[in-house]
Image: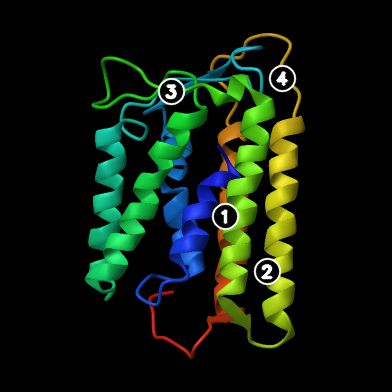
């Protein structure tokens, strides 16, 4: 799951009690941002194995801190605490934490069994990455439906409101297409080069920046609300 993780962010951002879209885009991928950061410094590990799944070669064999259920809940709690420390309300903190935690549940659908509950022990994953005919429309449907939901419940503040949302939608589609069409390596790669996690982090930063622009260029219908950006 890649852009599908942003579906909860789009939906949550339509609540007047929630943080705005830019912050929620960061929340939606906080677990993967931490994972790729941990890969770069050697705390967690991944390797590329040709044919590991039908859709990608990522063997995420060591990620006890970010992709265990207890770890995901820990990141969600940290988001809630950070929101409160920055002046956000308890409802905003809870909604943001739910968006963070949604990452693990969505990964459960697509990952090969590599998710744990406590960082060790049995591994879980329904493996939809081995079924592109199911996974691809599911991911597009989740993201596209949530984006349309957000668009219907917000209104532009001038031309920027339309342009920013259209650009965000195009960038989501383009990055997902790149993710799907990137060829698998011919031979195993262990460890993966630093360029791979860095590329993922750049993609997350770009999408978050566009989402912050959208949040500033659009407002919830029914009047302005003061919320944490």
> Residue 184: which disc?
4
The residue that appears at 46% across and 38% down in the rendered structure is 106
Mark 2 neighbour density, 10 Å: few (under 14) some (14–19) many (20 or more): many
Residue drawn at the location 31% of the way across and 32% of the way down: 65
Considering the image in quadrants, where does the C terminus appear? bottom left
Q: The residue tagged with tag 3: helix, strand or loop?
A: loop
Front residue (pair 145, 96):
145
CB-based contact (under 8 Å), mark 1 and mark 2: no
Q: Is residue 39 visible?
A: no
Closer to the N terminus: mark 4 or mark 3? 3
Task: Identify the element where label 1 is drawn.
Answer: helix
Of the image marks 3 and 2, the number of the one nearer the N terminus: 3
Q: Nearer the viewer, residue 136 or 101?
A: 136
Q: Which residue is mark 3?
A: 125
Left or right of 164: which side holds 43? left
Left or right: where does residue 57 sit relative to residue 6? right
Distance between the alpha carbons at the discs numbered 4 and 3: 21 Å
**Callout in the foreground (3, 1):** 3
Residue located beneath label 1 in the image: 205
Q: Nearer the viewer, residue 15 or 122?
A: 15
Residue at position x 39%, y 53% in the image: 99
Q: CA distance from mark 3 to mark 2?
A: 33 Å
Query: How far apart are labels 2 and 4 at the CA level?
Result: 32 Å
């Amino acid at each position: 799951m890649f852009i599908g993780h942003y579906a909860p962010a789009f939906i949550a951002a339509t609540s007047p009690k929630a943080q705005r879209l830019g912050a929620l885009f960061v929340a939606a991928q906080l677990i993967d941002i931490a994972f790729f950061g941990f890969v770069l410094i050697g705390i967690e590990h991944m390797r590329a194995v040709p044919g590991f799944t039908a859709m990608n070669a990522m063997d995420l064999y060591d990620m006890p801190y970010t992709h265990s259920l207890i770890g995901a809940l820990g990141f969600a709690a940290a988001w809630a605490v950070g929101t409160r420390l920055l002046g956000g309300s308890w409802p905003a903190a809870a909604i943001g934490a739910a968006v963070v935690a949604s990452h693990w549940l969505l990964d459960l659908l697509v990952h090969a069994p590599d998710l744990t509950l406590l960082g060790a022990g049995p591994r879980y994953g329904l493996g939809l990455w081995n079924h592109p005919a199911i996974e691809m429309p599911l991911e597009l449907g989740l993201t596209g439906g949530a984006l349309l939901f957000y668009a219907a419940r917000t209104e532009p503040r001038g031309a920027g409101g339309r342009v920013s949302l259209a650009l965000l939608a195009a960038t989501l589609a383009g990055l997902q297409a790149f993710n799907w069409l990137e060829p698998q390596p011919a031979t195993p790669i262990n460890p993966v080069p630093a360029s791979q996690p860095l590329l993922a982090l750049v993609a997350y930063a770009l999408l978050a920046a566009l989402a912050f622009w959208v949040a500033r260029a659009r407002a919830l219908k029914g009047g302005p609300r003061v919320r944490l950006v």
